[in-house]
Amino acid sequence: MRVITLTTDFGSQDWFVGTMKGVLLGVNPKATLVDITHEIPPGDIRAGAFALMASYMFFPKGTVHVAVVDPGVGSERKAIAVQTANYTFVGPDNGVLSFALANEKITDVRQLENNKYFLNPVSHTFHGRDIFAPIAAHLSGGVAVSNLGPKQKHIIQLPWPRPEISRNRISGEVIYVDRFGNAITNILNTCLAGMKEAEVFIAGKRACRVKPFYQSVPAGKAVAVPGSSGFLEIAVNGGSAAQSLGIKIGNTLTIRKVVAG
């Protein structure tokens, strides 16, 4: 018995997620299914990659992680399964797995070509149901990754924007906006060590100070906090930073240490 997680841009309005779960349980009725999220913006591969990266390591070793944000479904893009020292990842080879895999020791990558493990016939528009779900279920039941198809040496990597760090200044960008309107940056919380007092500037204008938690500032005020994802996030106490500050994915920001005197 293994846990299978699902990360998709399918939403909850249609039958897509439910159908995937039906296929999963049809192959392995004993599997434990966990939804990470199905509210990734349609086709937003980077958002899917970040959501998976922020969550995958909190599951038991042996978990099979399925990520389907797949605007290239039916094209020549590859479908892959990636075995690491701790987990198995299943999805399209379009970068959606890459942020999570950057933190893992990869032991095997296989193209999904053995249609013995597919739901046949395979639709050109719903590989989540016909390829990724049955493959994940078979893996959770003990099928080895090596049975799925030929080896693949490399996977597609999404570029990760690296912050610029100096003694009194860090420059970064917004990489994800959650449903609360919190803007998650590419600046690791650990980068703030030594910056007990720091201010955040967006588009050259002072936006807020770095504080330990949301209610460190009055309601309606902006604040930067070390987020649970491991990255600094810009928030508004009781509100939306995205709306109040007009923040969008890709916006750049600067953190400056407050120097006494």
Image (tube, helix red, strand yellow):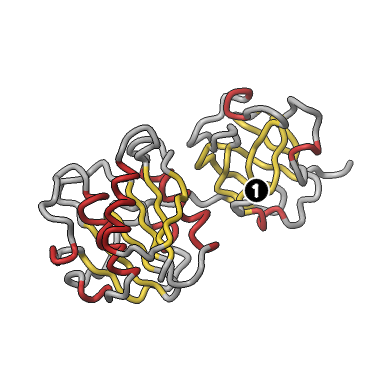
Tally the numbered discs: 1
**Residue 177 falls left or right of residue 68:** right
Can you give x and y, in whole percent of width and height, for residue 84 in the image? 39, 72
The quadrant the N terminus occupies is bottom left
Side of 146 relative to 21 (left or right): left
Could you tell me which quadrant the C terminus lies in? top right
Residue under the point 37% across and 45% down:
8
Circle 1: is it few (<14), some (14-19), or many (20+) Cα within 10 Å? many
Q: Return the residue nearer the eye: 97 or 39.
A: 39
Question: Which residue: 57% across, 44% down?
Answer: 185
Can you name the residue that lies furthest to the right here?
261
Q: Secondary structure at mark 1?
A: loop
* Image spot of residue 140 (x, y percent): 35, 68
Residue toward you, 29 or 190: 29
Does 138 sit above or below residue 210?
below
Q: Where in the figure is residue 75, as x and y percent of width and height?
A: 15, 46
Q: Which residue is painted at 36% across and 53% down in the image? A: 67
What is the x, y in percent for residue 51? 47, 49
User: Toward the viewer: 71 or 2?
Assistant: 2
Amino acid at circle 1? Gly
Question: Which residue in the structure is indicated by mark 1?
Answer: 227
Q: Tell me the residue at 74%/27% (across/down).
A: 221
Relative placement, left or right, of 68 versus 163 is: left
User: Residue reaching furthest left?
Assistant: 121
In the image: residue 93, left or right of residue 241: left
